[in-house]
Structures are given as C-alpha cells and as structure tokens.
Image: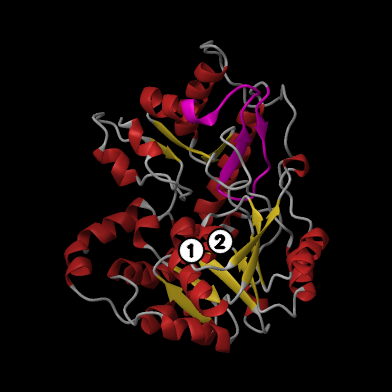
C-alpha cells in the first residue's frame, strides 16, 4: 500500500486512489468513508448491473423530474426542495448565493462548512466544541457566541461529524427560534437517518415554512452510494427556488435517477439496513470501550470518534492499520478542533471490526494480541451510549 497517498492532501484520499496505489490483491476494509454497508441490497446492485449499458448510454431526465419523484417518496413539496450533485455542490451554492459576510460554525465538524466560505473571502466564526464536554453543543452558549461575533449565518451538523454528537429535536427548534433574525440558519442532517435516540424526522418540515432555515440531506451516505453524488436541501419556496434556479438543469446523473425511482419499492429494505447498522454501532461502541485508556464518544452517526491513549498518535496507527491489516481509518489531525490523537471509525459489520480491533490492539498495547471482550470497560468513557 502506497502510504504517501495519505499525506498528499488535506482530505482523505479516495478509495480508488488507494486501490491504484496498492499491490495487495485484497482491497482495504474502509473504516474511513461513512457509508451504509447494508444498502443497496445485492438485488439492487444486480438490477443496476443488468441495466448498466442503458444507464451509462443515455442522458438522465432533468433535475425537476428526478426531484419530483424524490419528493413523492419522501413526502416533500417539490417547491421546497433543490437536489444537488452531492451535498458539497449545495454547500457551494448556498455560500455563493446566501452567505454575504460571515458564518458561524461549531468545530470540529464537516470541513466544507469552514473551507467553502473561507475560500470565497467570508469571515468564519468558529465556535469550539469542548472535549471536556464530550463535544456537546450548548444552544444558549452558541447563540451567545453568534451574538457576540455578529455572525449573520449559523450552521449546525446534526448528528455532527466527526463525533456523532446529537442535538435533540426540541433543542434544534429552540435554536431556530432564537436565531429567527439571522440571514440564514443551516441544519446539516446528512447523517440524520442513522439517529435512533428518538423518533427522528428531522426539521425539514420546519425549514419549509420558516423564513431563514435550510435543511441539508445527503442521500449517498444514507443509501451507501457515495459514488452517485446526490443530496438535497429543503427550505421555504423562495429560498429553495433561489438555489434551484442557479443549479445546472442536468446536474444529476442517470444512476441518481434510477436509484430515486427505485426507492419507493425499497424502503422496507432501507429501514432494515438502518436497524442493522444501529445494532452494529452499539456492539462496536462496547468493544472499543473495553480497550484500556481509549476514550470512545457516544454517537448517533454511522461512525465513532475515539481518542487514543496518552502518548499515542493517530498517524502511525493509521499507517500501521493500512499497511499491516488492510484497514483504512480516518485520522483527524487535519480536522479543525481535533488533533491527530483522534480517529473517526466508521461502523461496519463484525467480521470487519475484528480486523480493526486486532490491528489496534497490536499497535497500542505493545504487540500483545489478546481477545477484546464485548462488554465491560477499563477506561473513562467519553459519553454514555444513546439508546
């Protein structure tokens, strides 16, 4: 495995880059990119394979047609929705069209919420989420920070990336009420479907009727299809139209169209994939929590943030896992608000997690290869696991 790829850029290298740089016959097990491992089902992939020539050969329908079908499945009003070629495209247009001067964002969080406005010359007011409080967001304190800095746009990611911290729905609504006078409040719910702490429909319904709220959703993460690049935003009709009108008419590809038109008949399988993933998250949390002096943060995303024991750095551990065990993890040294002592580990099935645990045990505990029990704890836990 060519480890220089891991040091060549701020963002993690793509899975394709790793495959091209590998002489190993086995592809790496991906604990880096947050992807649903249980969806699409093998039957869906088989259907896509059978229709591959048609999908690749012909133009897709325009974005309005694909958006109308998505809204029919999700119970949304098409006038309140804009679909993008990945949530990053929508973040880019939101910044260009709707962020005039300044944007407040808690850190650590998804890097495009800081990098994108900085690239276009905006002032980014970074609100630090404290490790001592398990990176939890305090609504009152965040609002006070926004008022003190004079920020005109505010962002939260819920659940947050990379820690998986979750703000209950009633707290999100309280935040929206307190910031009703801002130019814009963005709630990035890219990982919202993985929440099981409460019956969670998000706040898209609120965004559709409020004057200054956008909710962002990523279909690739939820449906396990990052390569298709599709996501959507919900806002009141005027806001949604402003973004929608700026997007290219054919900004969505044929794969995205086929998946969107399949969704209605696959929702039972999709809900089952979320149930299985949430069970894997609980088990993986318990297993990691047994590792001496490793801090594990409670998460409602499809990933877990861990802090390595004192004296350990994530860069050599990441390299060891990839080179010796074929396991690819996200070291967080280039994420604002964290250090290289933190790793973000995607939730995966148990056969993959065993490989991760063996590699981490070898590296962290002087090569003593012992069994990782499923329950019990030897260290300070960073947060209790949400039900």
Regarding mark 1 in the picture, which secondary structure is present there? helix
Confirm whether the magenta stretch covers residue 220.
Answer: no
Image position, residue 117 (x, y; %): 53, 66
Q: How many marks?
A: 2
Would you say residue 297 sits in the magenta stretch? yes
The stretch in magenta equals 293-316
Residue ID for mark 2: 113
Tell me if 348 is positioned left or right of 46 in this view: right
Name the front one of labels 1 and 2.
Answer: 1
Q: Are marks 1 and 2 in contact (CB under 8 Å)?
A: no
- Image coordinates of residue 267 in percent, x first then y, are 48, 64
Which quarter of the rendered picture does the N terminus lie within? top left
Mark 1 vs mark 2, CA separation in Å: 11 Å
Could you tell me residue 229's position as x and y percent?
A: 38, 63
Question: Quadrant location of residue 295?
Answer: top right
Using the rendered image of the protein, determine whether residue 319 is visible from the camera's viewpoint: yes
Q: Which residue is mark 1?
A: 119
Who is closer to the viewer here, 46 or 70?
A: 70
Relative to 13, 32 lies left or right: right
Q: Residue at x 16, y 64 (%)?
A: 53
Which comes sooner in the sequence, label 1 or label 2? 2
Q: Nearer the viewer, residue 78 or 104?
A: 104
Please say whether residue 387 is visible from this viewpoint: no
User: Residue at image x 59%, y 41%?
Assistant: 304
């Amino acid at each position: 495995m060519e480890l220089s790829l891991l040091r060549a850029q701020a963002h993690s290298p793509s899975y394709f880059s790793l495959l091209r740089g590998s002489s190993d016959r086995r592809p790496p097990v991906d604990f880096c990119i947050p992807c649903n491992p249980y969806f699409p089902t093998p039957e869906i992939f088989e259907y896509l394979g059978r229709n591959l020539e048609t999908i690749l050969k012909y133009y897709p329908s325009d974005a309005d047609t694909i958006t109308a079908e998505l809204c029919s499945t999700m119970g949304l009003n098409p006038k309140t929705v804009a679909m993008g070629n990945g949530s990053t495209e929508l973040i880019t247009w939101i910044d260009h069209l709707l962020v005039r001067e300044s944007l407040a964002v808690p850190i650590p969080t998804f890097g495009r919420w800081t990098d994108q406005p900085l690239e276009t010359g905006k002032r980014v007011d970074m609100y630090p989420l404290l490790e001592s409080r398990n990176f939890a967001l305090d609504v009152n304190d965040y609002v006070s920070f926004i008022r003190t800095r004079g920020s005109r746009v505010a962002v939260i990611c819920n659940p947050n990336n990379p820690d998986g911290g979750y703000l209950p729905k009633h707290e999100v609504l309280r935040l929206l009420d307190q910031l009703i006078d801002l130019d814009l409040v963005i709630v990035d719910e890219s990982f919202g479907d993985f929440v099981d702490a409460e019956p969670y429909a998000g706040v898209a319904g609120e965004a559709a009727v409020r004057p200054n709220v956008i909710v962002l959703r990523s279909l690739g993460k939820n449906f396990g299809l990052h390569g298709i690049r599709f996501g959507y935003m919900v806002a009141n009709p005027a806001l949604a139209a402003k973004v929608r009108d700026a997007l290219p008419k054919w900004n969505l590809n044929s794969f995205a169209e086929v998946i969107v038109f399949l969704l209605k008949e696959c929702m039972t399988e999709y809900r089952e994939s979320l149930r299985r993933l949430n069970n894997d998250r609980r088990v993986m949390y318990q297993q990691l929590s047994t590792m001496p002096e490793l801090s594990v943060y409670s998460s409602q995303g499809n990933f877990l943030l861990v802090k390595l024991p004192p004296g350990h750095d994530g860069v050599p551990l990441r390299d060891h896992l990839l080179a010796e065990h074929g396991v690819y993890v996200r070291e967080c040294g280039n994420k604002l608000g964290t250090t290289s002592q933190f790793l973000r580990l995607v939730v995966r099935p148990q056969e993959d997690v065993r490989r991760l645990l063996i590699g981490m045990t070898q590296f962290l505990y002087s090569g003593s290869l012992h069994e990782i029990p499923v329950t019990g704890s030897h260290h300070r836990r960073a947060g209790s696991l949400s039900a």
